[in-house]
Amino acid sequence: MKELVSILIPILNPELTVLEELILRHSLEALKRYPVILFSYEGADLSGIETNHDSLEILTFRPKYFENRQTLANLFLMEDFYNRFTWSDFVLIHELNSWIVKDEIHYWCKQGYDYLHANPVLDNSVFKNGQVNDFSKVLGLNDEQKKALGNGFNNDGLKLCHVQRMISTLSAKKKESHLYREQNDFDNKDSLFWELEANRLWPYLRKPTEIVQTRFSQNIENKSALFPDNRDAWPTGITGVNAKNIDHLPFYK
């Protein structure tokens, strides 16, 4: 039977930091009703992780994709990556810089969207009112805007993806995805691609509005919007979590 959603956790360095181990332990408990797959490079020694967390499934890819976050982005822009998970309708790519506040993953899979993530934290000096208008996306951003938008996705480590839609989009955008994989001038180029190219001229992916995206996940840098008094209004997940700011999360235990 096909899975509705599987949780994918990339491991660039098998020697997890204290924070990464904490996030992993929390996520395995919070998302325990879903299949969880750790993926890393061929030959990676994950015995330390497996010892602390039994019943984990491990998948491996070529080492060149795990040198840093930029090379990992190349993997996320390849059809072959998503083809490994066609037995699942959705995958939640969960990097260990993101905190699951509450398990609403099943709910989000049923909302009819193909790609959900946190809104970027934009530089107001580059983007008027801190927004990228749709007209600019169609015409194309200049290099300064593209770089600023890429920076806005720093540590955006929580993405819910419809597997077949990601495959079909990359198939239709082979030239564009290849150019992005070859491009190293912009950070977070996977997020840039899905933000700028996936629906340029034709809507290949069903995406939510920015308001809806804030209910799915938010970057911790958007502090003013993060902590409403109503707990039910907190998002499903928080991205951009590090050792300096995790203690500021009111739902952190």
Image: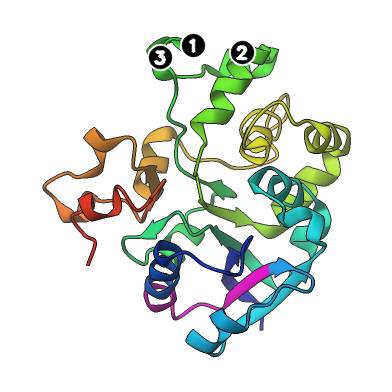
Does the stretch in magenta take in 38?
yes
The picture places residue 55, in percent across and down from the top left corner, at 56, 89
Please tell me whether residue 137 is drawn above or below residue 162 in the rendered image: above
Q: Which residue is mark 3?
A: 124
- Disc 1 marks a residue whose amino acid type is Val
Does the stretch in magenta take in 96?
no
Work out how far the residue at label 2 is from the one at label 3, CA to CA, in angstroms: 13 Å
The picture places residue 128, in percent across and down from the top left corner, at 43, 10
User: Secondary structure beneath disc 3?
Assistant: loop
Of callouts 2 and 3, the N-terminal one:
3
Of callouts 1 and 2, the N-terminal one:
1
Q: Which residue is mark 2?
A: 144
Please tell me whether residue 98 is drawn above or below residue 198 in the rendered image: below
Callout 3–callout 1 Cβ contact below 8 Å: yes
Along the line of sight, which residue is nearer the eye, 67 or 202?
Answer: 67
The picture places residue 231, in percent across and down from the top left corner, at 17, 55
Callout 1–callout 2 Cβ contact below 8 Å: yes
Where, by quadrant of the figure, is residue 207 drawn?
top right
Along the line of sight, which residue is nearer the eye, 35 or 232?
Answer: 35
- Region in magenta: 28-39
- Disc 3 marks a residue whose amino acid type is Asn
Q: Which residue is mark 1?
A: 126
Along the line of sight, which residue is nearer the eye, 200 or 128?
Answer: 128
Taking the spot 56% from the left edge, 19% from the top edge, the residue there is 134
User: Secondary structure beneath disc 2?
Assistant: helix
